[in-house]
Image (cartoon, grey):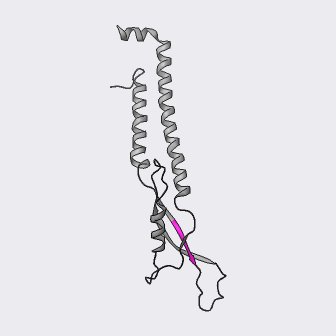
Amino acid sequence: MRINGRTWPAWASAAATIWFVAITVFWAAKPLVDRVPITVTAAPVANQPPPAVGARSAGPTITITCGTPSESKVTDTAANLVRLVSLVDKSGRLLNDPAFARPPCTGFHHQSRLLWFGDIGLYALALAGLAAVMVRRRRHHPHRALAAAA
């Protein structure tokens, strides 16, 4: 099938559909991953002034699995907290009061969902535009429609 004046709308709609399915399968249906920094309660260090009450220091950065852009669940909060309190330092001891420096997955998931909704809107606009072209073509060329019917 060649691309010409009669067949280009079918080719364009097929290309748009393949693009949309590819984005859905390879990106929107896969879980997102966020790397979140951790803070711990500041510990006194030898030959240094004592830390202020409630002071926190930087801890490790951990990887959190987020929901997919196509689902509403951002992340499993209970699993993240269990993982957080079970973090150990290099010597094998539990970290001292670990906490996330920022909420995991929240902004990351929100931006991904906006991109996903934009992709859906762009696909709908492409199909609507192609449908409008086809309707307009049939109105302006009635002899082609009658010849096709005969």
Instruction: Quarter of the image for the C terminus: give it.
Output: top left
Q: Name the residue located 38 percent from the left edge and 46 percent from the top edge.
A: 25
Q: Is residue 111 above or below residue 65?
A: above
The image shows residue 142 at horizontal and vertical percentages of 46, 10
Q: Measured from the top left, where is residue 102 in percent x and y?
A: 57, 64
Image point (40%, 40%), residue name: 21
Foreground residue among 46 and 68: 68
Image height of 116 relative to 43, above or below: above
Most extreme residue toward the bottom, as rendered?
A: 47
27 inside magenta stretch: no
Which residue corresponds to the image point at 57% horizontal and 75% vertical from the top-left? Answer: 58
Estimate the x, y position of residue 91 in percent, counting from the top left.
Answer: 44, 84
Q: Locate residue 31, reporting x and y percent.
A: 42, 55
Chain part drawn in magenta: 36-49
| Whether residue 23 is situated above or below residue 15 in the rendered picture | below
* Nearer to the camera, 54 or 15: 54
The N terminus, quarter of image: top left
Judge whether residue 45 is colored magenta. yes
Q: How many marks?
A: 0
Farthest residue, direction left: 1
Residue drawn at 45 percent across, 78 percent down: 88
Q: Say whether residue 55 is left or right of residue 7.
A: right
User: 9 or 85: which is nearer to us?
Assistant: 85
Quadrant in which residue 103 is drawn = bottom right
